[in-house]
Amino acid sequence: MPVQIIVGAQWGDEGKGKIVDHLSEDVDIVARYQGGANAGHTVVVPTKTPSGITTKEYVLHLIPSGIFHKHVTCVIGNGVVIDPVALMAEIGQLQALGINIKGRLLISHNAHLIMPYHKLLDSIREQGDQKIGTTGRGIGPAYIDKYMRIGIRVVDLLDRDVLCKKLKRNIEEKNELLSKVYHSQELNVDTIISEYQEFDKKIDEYVTDTSEFLNNALKKKKKILAEGAQGAFLDVDHGTYPYVTSSSPTSGGACTGLGIPPTAVNSIVGVVKAYSTRVGNGPLPTELNNEIGERLRKIGGEYGATTGRPRRCGWLDLVSLRYSVRVNGIQKIAITKLDVLDEFEEINVCVGYKHKGKSIRNFPTDVQTLESIEPEYRTFKGWLTKTSDVRSYAKLPVQARKYIEAIQSLLKTKVWMVSVGARRDQTLLVR
């Protein structure tokens, strides 16, 4: 039963959107399994114009990246938390482009909804002294309510009485918190109920039991691509806690977030940027707070697709990647943004850590250790040649291939694909 999981193997922003878009040509279904509108998956789509073929960049936050392929059905699974405002904006954007969504977008009736009070609480908390560096989109508070078993699900929109009962209880509790603790303006119950019932009318045609849909598709031997958001080191269980997201971007989250069995999974692909980046707070062992880090940011256009925040940049970290390969069960790797390194005379790769004078082989997930480690680097000679025009792996510069093959050897994991630009045709298969 062919389910392929695509995971971000680092701190997110690895270019999963492009890889999913590329692989969508050969699948039937692309399903998103966790996260919310705090993710930004960028897809560059060829567009016909009177003067020829041009490309246009689109950023998706909730709808899976396979939506630009007419034959693909896209699923938003039960593990996703849905912001109605963001979802309707995306649907409107795609419809304005002439992309037919009817019958091609399915939303789980068990997915939880982000409410106005979630966004408000998130933004207030991020103004305090203990910032995590979230996007302030209400993701964390929505997941808190989910696990406190007081969340509002899509299915709750179908019954006004159920919705009113749940919302009144939640808003009374949140208003007390907002007024007494944060001295913020209180929310109106009736206004929110009306807004969300209007939302229900707009999404009703997309809502279904997506677990049943996916499992029936598996019986018919349909090919499914499971798409995660963020990256492995932002996983609430396996990441750099507490500087993590509120869900499980690792491969294990795909089964719970979609309602499919582990036995259906036959391939796990890790997307790896050719260097390291991170948005928000928390440790980044190879971070470069110098001219080199700034060059990586400038050449790579390293600014958050959702927030526009500058990403912190550093060299590739193989210690953390070995850990990611292990917890995700990654069988093959797609390396993105290799072309960003074209202008560097020397390229460093972190192959080990030192802590208090001692070598560390395994990746420590406690923040205290990670913030005080010293990276041990291996230096590679740069290729100083433009790679964005290369269309086969064999034609990459020798030093670029040495860099890729060293990564493969040190990780003991096959490099399957290399990206040298944002366009679909800038994707090289490693034979």
Image (cartoon, rainbow, N blue to C red):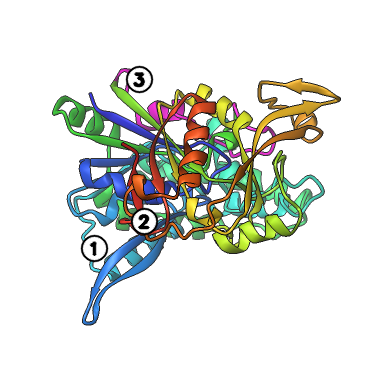
Tell me which amino acid carries mark 3.
Answer: Pro
**Quadrant of the rendered structure where residue 413 is?**
top left
Please state the horizontal and vertical placement of residue 337, each as a whole percent of the image. 48, 52
| Residue 222 within the magenta-colored segment of the rendering | no
Q: Residues within 10 Å of mark 3 (few under 14, many from 20)?
A: few
Please state the horizontal and vertical placement of residue 161, each as a whole percent of the image. 41, 44
Counting labels gives 3
Q: Classify the position of the N terminus by image quarter.
A: top left
Instruction: Kindly report the distance in space between the C-alpha atoms of the residues bearing marks 1 and 3.
Output: 33 Å
Segment tinted magenta in the rendering: 238-263
| Residue 255 within the magenta-colored segment of the rendering | yes
Which residue in the protein does label 1 denote?
99
Extreme residue in the front direction: 398
Q: Nearer the viewer, mark 2 or mark 3?
A: 2
Which residue in the protein does label 3 denote?
262
Q: Is residue 390 above or below residue 370?
A: below
- Residue at the spot 73% in from the left edge and 22% down from the top edge: 360
Which residue in the protein does label 2 denote?
390
Looking at marks 1 and 3 on the same chain, the residue that comes earlier in the sequence is marked by 1
Q: Nearer the viewer, mark 1 or mark 2?
A: 2
Majority secondary structure of magenta residues: loop
Residue 235 shows up from this direction: yes
- Residue at the spot 59% in from the left edge and 37% down from the top edge: 234
